[in-house]
Amino acid sequence: MATYKGIKGFNIQTVSSDPPAPFAGQVWYNSTSATVKYFAVQSASWATGGNLTTARRMLGGAGTQTAGLAFGGRAPSTGTNATEEYNGSAWTNGGNMGTAKSELGGTGTQTAGLAFGGDGPSKTNTTEEYNGSSWTGGGNLSSATNKVVGTGTQTAGLSIGGEPSGNPTALTQEYNGSSWTAGGTLGTGRYSMGAAGTQTAALAFGGDPGKKTNTEEYNGTSWTAGGVLNTAVAEQAGFGLQTAAISAGGFSTSSPITAVTEQYDGSSWTTTANLNTARKQVAGAGSTTAGLAFAGTTANNPSGEKSVLTEEFSSGGPATLTVGTD
Amino acid sequence: MTKTYQYCVAENWGKDFIDHNESSRITFKGLPGNVWQVPAYNKHGNLWIAKVAGSVKTLAEAQAIVSAEVTASQTAWDALSDEEKGNSSRPADITLEE
């Protein structure tokens, strides 16, 4: 029978605690936990996170994987003003928005969130700011629009595109913490797309009408063409940075609800691990190393099937695993 | 014929219903009716079904559950106003794979 020593030329080391800096492929026996462990490079993956209290879709999202924020949305056929805060494992109720709305733009952090535009029940140009416990009014967008997306922070935010009058707009607006001013114009007017980055280094990708594949990059002044998504999609979750972004789920040309996830490196998109549950009209937050996709609809039905499901994205990488368990 | 997938019914309880180790080892597919598709003849798939206390279903049983959910969604969609229908398309049938 082959032995480990026969294969590797040495025995498995017995240690009382895990080595502080193991190398890929290293195996050891931890005498304290009585387990054989190894160090390996894991691939990207989505794991389930805590379920939201209020099932919803077409909502706003902000924050990080361990400090996320969900606000507004349709639950199921009318707008909600409910806000929930995520701590990396569970959602708890936050302060309610002043106005129930869906199809809104959202960005910022759990303690400094920004919500703007949306449908509540008619298209609105209002902005609300979250301080970690309550929402207060901010400056108005130049025009009422829904299906708008956001990125950046509460004091340096970006409103991108939307559908103000039944048609897509190419308008971008910049927020300084109190008022919106016009920014550069998208090359392609669109709504319900993904967005990521900051006010001066933003990314807009996919979207409607027509389920787009093209990406545009913003430098604080103007938009230029970026890489092309492998799958044309709208209504997806978008998060991350201009040079490291994720597009997850959505409504694609090949499927009304997709689980496809793609990662952007600043110039091109590559497919990565699929969501465990396909969904669209989903919110996103976080980064390419620790992201979050939450809520949405898991069946193509506008009157229901809103979701409470959360998934957490990991880019993978080196990890200590236990033989027989992992 | 050798099957590629197995199916079970399990309710997603949230955190770590599927963890990163599991997700990086096998591909999960969540379907209507709390039906989950995982690889057949796979240790990690079997371990996960045991962890979540999944109720294993044959392909025909799983298909019946999914189809019933889709039919209900289609019926609900059919009852919408034309304006509401204009915002989406009718839920599509789902055919499970062996």
Image (cartoon, rainbow, N blue to C red):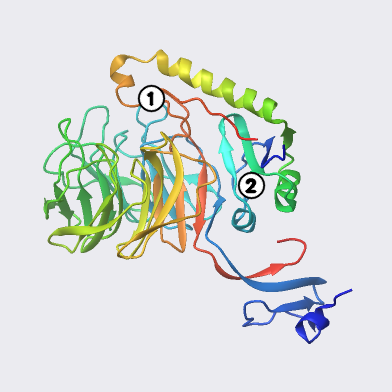
- Amino acid type of the residue tagged 1 in the rendering: Ser
Work out how far the residue at label 1 is from the one at label 2, CA to CA, in angstroms. 28 Å
Residue wearing tag 2: B17
Q: Which chain carries label 2?
A: B
The image quadrant of residue A147 is: top left
Give residue A62's position: percent from left, percent from top: 37, 52
Q: Which chain carries label 1?
A: A
Give residue B1's position: percent from left, percent from top: 72, 37
Rendered residue at 16%/36% (across/down): A144
Q: Which of marks 1 and 2 is in front?
A: 2
**A65 or B34, which is in the foreground?**
B34
Give residue A110's position: percent from left, percent from top: 39, 54
From this viewpoint, is residue A193 visible? yes
Residue B12 is labelled as: none
Residue A77 is labelled as: 1
The image quadrant of residue B38 is: top right
Residue placed furthest toward the right: A1
Q: Quadrant location of the N terminus of chain A?
A: bottom right
Count the numbered circles shown.
Answer: 2
